[in-house]
Image: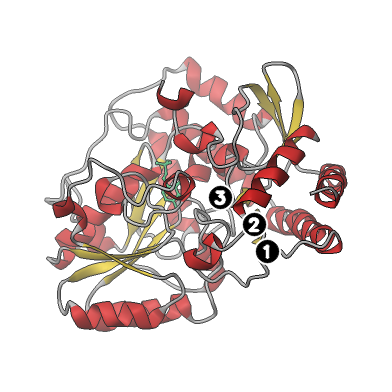
Amino acid sequence: MPGGVSSPVRAFKSVGGQPIVFDRVKGAYIWDVDGNQYIDYVGTWGPAICGHAHPEVLAALEVALAKGTSFGAPCTLENVLAEMVIDAVPSVEMVRFVNSGTEACMAVLRLMRAFTGREKLIKFEGCYHGHADMFLVKAGSGVATLGLPDSPGVPKSVTSHTLTAPYNDLEAVQALFSQYPDQIAGVILEPVVGNAGFIPPDGGFLAGLREITKEQGALLVFDEVMTGFRIAYGGAQEKFGIMPDLTTLGKVIGGGLPVGAYGGRRDIMTMVAPAGPVYQAGTLSGNPLAMTAGIKTLELLRRSGTYEQLDQITGKLISGLLRIAQEAGHEVCGGHINGMFGMFFTPGPVHNYEDAKAADAGKFAKFHHGMLEHGIYLAPSQFEAGFTSLAHTEADINQTLAAAKAVLTNL
Ligand SMILES: *Cc1c(COP(=O)(O)O)cnc(C)c1O
């Protein structure tokens, strides 16, 4: 396996050293093959919002498993999850299930182009929309971690239609629309960035994008693969009260199994085959196991007080980390929204990818390894957000902060 892993950031290249090989997960914890236990703040990069291997998710999966793993034909579980997504996410009137966030973003771009008859797209520096060619321009996450400017093998002809702007910069977006009148199909973004570290939108940024795209006859697409059902049950669009035209989802809606989805306005979504001419398909799409894990996960999230609990636990974590770091003499900034958080080793504030890159990566690497030695598993890159779950307890947070105090004091 190239680099010994199935996905690049797992290899610890950005923090140095060897990755840990894991054996099992449960609740807020993760155990390596040597039997060491860690408190986990990666949560398989977001899906484990109810805690790993939740007993109710496992029980539902056992029932589904007995009926078979894939039908390659319609199953009613797809309708159940589709209804849940449509009820939850304000702008979604119709939805199509796929197998990953990457697939969802690829499909949504084809649809944006088909609907508008335009080819160009605007994305933001440091935003990640999966690994499809058209999005591998200033793409954050693993691309940032490995310092690849773009990827070899991506034809210039494919990315020549990908325009980029700094995050939180409405003037740059307006300038691109002036430069390419009637040529831009739409704007895609992470409504809260998680793939360049945690960067929330400035007040007015999302509303400004909504206004500009509407004026220009272009589409606004929220990539909520990370934020959907994580920063609020209805995602960033519910949290900030902005209606995009299209939305991509993944991570949480698969409950730990491979799922992605895209959805939005009915008049746009009815262009997708076989209702319309825009082709997109998948052998395992909507399979009963993935649908079951997604349905049960959303059911658990719908119980009362879940997001308040995530907010409380994550707020305690991040405010504690920032205070301890500052007391130890480090310049830091950071924040959280419900179950998503981040801290940078820079005085900040961090509004965009340039600001994030100014953070002290060497210090982060030392912090990461120190925390590992104390049994705390953080994402092995400063360009990744952190995640909590409903399984994280006050005691877990206290243990994490005690570890942080020991590590940051000696850093
Ligand atoms: C994780 C992620 C993706 C890609 O999803 P995969 O399932 O890894 O293909 C796309 N967009 C965002 C915002 C993500 O966080």
Q: CA distance from mark 2 to mark 1?
A: 6 Å
- Mark 1: which secondary structure? strand
- Is tag 2's residue or tag 3's residue first in the polypeptide sequence? 2
- Is tag 1's residue or tag 3's residue first in the polypeptide sequence? 1
Residue 56 sits in quarter: top right
| Screen quadrant of the N terminus | top left
Question: Between 201 and 228, which is closer to the camera in this rendering?
Answer: 201
Q: In this orientation, does residue 297 appear? A: yes
Residue type at mark 2 is Gly
Above or below 289: residue 67: above
Residue 246 sits in quarter: bottom left
Q: Is residue 29 left or right of residue 16?
A: right
Q: Which residue is mark 2?
A: 342
Asked if labels 1 and 2 touch by Cβ distance under 8 angstroms, the answer is yes
Q: Which residue is mark 3?
A: 384
- Mark 2: which secondary structure? strand
Q: Which residue is mark 1?
A: 335
Question: Between 408 and 194, which is closer to the camera in this rendering?
Answer: 408
Q: CA distance from mark 1 to mark 3?
A: 13 Å
